[in-house]
Image (tube, grey):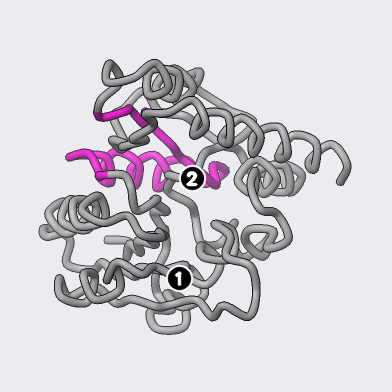
Amino acid sequence: MSKLGIVLIGRNEGKRLTECLKSVLDETKNYEQTAIVYIDSGSTDGSVQTAKSLGVSAISLDSDRPFTAARGRNTGWKWLLKEHPDVTYIQFMDGDCTLMAGWLEKATEMLENNPTIAVVSGRRREKFPDATPYNRLADLEWNTPIGEALACGGDSLIRVKALQQVEGFNDSLICGEEPEMCIRLRGQGWKIWRLDEEMTAHDADMTRFSQWWSRMIRSGWAIAQGMAM
């Protein structure tokens, strides 16, 4: 069986991180070979202690450089391969998500049977899509087309060989690091795939227009920065 790695990133996720960690631990309990690490970006709510209390390795990023998702993910996968060099596939997840039952098995099977695919993602859903209009918009955003894709999101299972080939995510990007990496992967001949399977449940917890607007600004920044590269 291929050895799995799990990289979780977060900042002040509170109870959402606890739910995330427990879902991952529950889903991987039947996998004999799984390495899990949580990368924290300056949390002040005890997130690191929460992870360690559940038996998960946790690393706090230094504050000498800006905290970004790309930096967190790169720190995570590089640590995993240093400590567990036999890891074959890595599932990346945000700390405000929970892992759906059966996803790892289906995603791993897809990569095992298709050696030209570098990244597999599935359906991310909002836990409470009807709570606010902003949550509903996020849920619609996650509903991406099935089949071969141009890019993936923050939650995905990635082949280590492909990840190493492109040297991971671009640390200089404050957002949009996944599509940028996928461009480089496809440039090397790899494929990105979206399975018609449930992958993760996300808790956006957007209750105010200002939260949604900040999200739109970040999305616009990612597009503009990507076009300028």
Q: Which residue does the image show at 22% across and 77% down from the upper left?
A: 52
Asked if residue 102 lies in the magenta stretch, the reply is yes
| The residue stretch that appears in magenta | 98-127
Which is nearer the eye, 188 or 144? 144
Q: Whole-percent x and y of residue 77?
A: 48, 68
Quarter of the picture holding the N terminus: bottom left
Mark nearer the N terminus (2 vs 1): 1
Tell me where residue 32 appears, x and y as whole percent: 17, 67
Tags 2 and 1 touching, CB below 8 Å? no
Q: Residue at x 61, y 65 (%)?
A: 164
Which label belongs to residue 12?
Answer: none
Left or right of residue 4, residue 22 in this image: left
Residue at the disc numbered 2: 154
Q: Amino acid at mark 2?
A: Gly
Residue 204, given in percent of the width and then of the height, sits at 37, 35
Q: Is residue 138 left or right of residue 172?
A: left
- In the rendered structure, find residue 42 and report the number of the disc placed on it: 1
Question: In terms of depth relative to the viewer, which is nearer, 124 or 80?
Answer: 124
Residue placed most toward the observer, 219 or 30: 219
Helix, strand or loop under label 1: loop
Amino acid type, residue under disc 1 in the picture: Gly
Which numbered disc, 2 or 1, marks the residue closer to the eye? 1
Residue 175 picture location, percent across and down: 63, 47
Mark 2: secondary structure: loop
Residue at horizontal 71 percent and vertical 40 percent from the top: 222
Give the answer, above or below, for where 198 lies relative to 181: above
From this viewpoint, which residue is outermost toward the bottom?
83
Residue 130 lies in what quarter of the image?
top left
The magenta stretch spans residue 16: no
Q: Which residue occupies 49% across, 34% down?
A: 211
Label 2 Cα neighbours within 10 Å, binned few <14 / some 14-19 / many ≥20: some
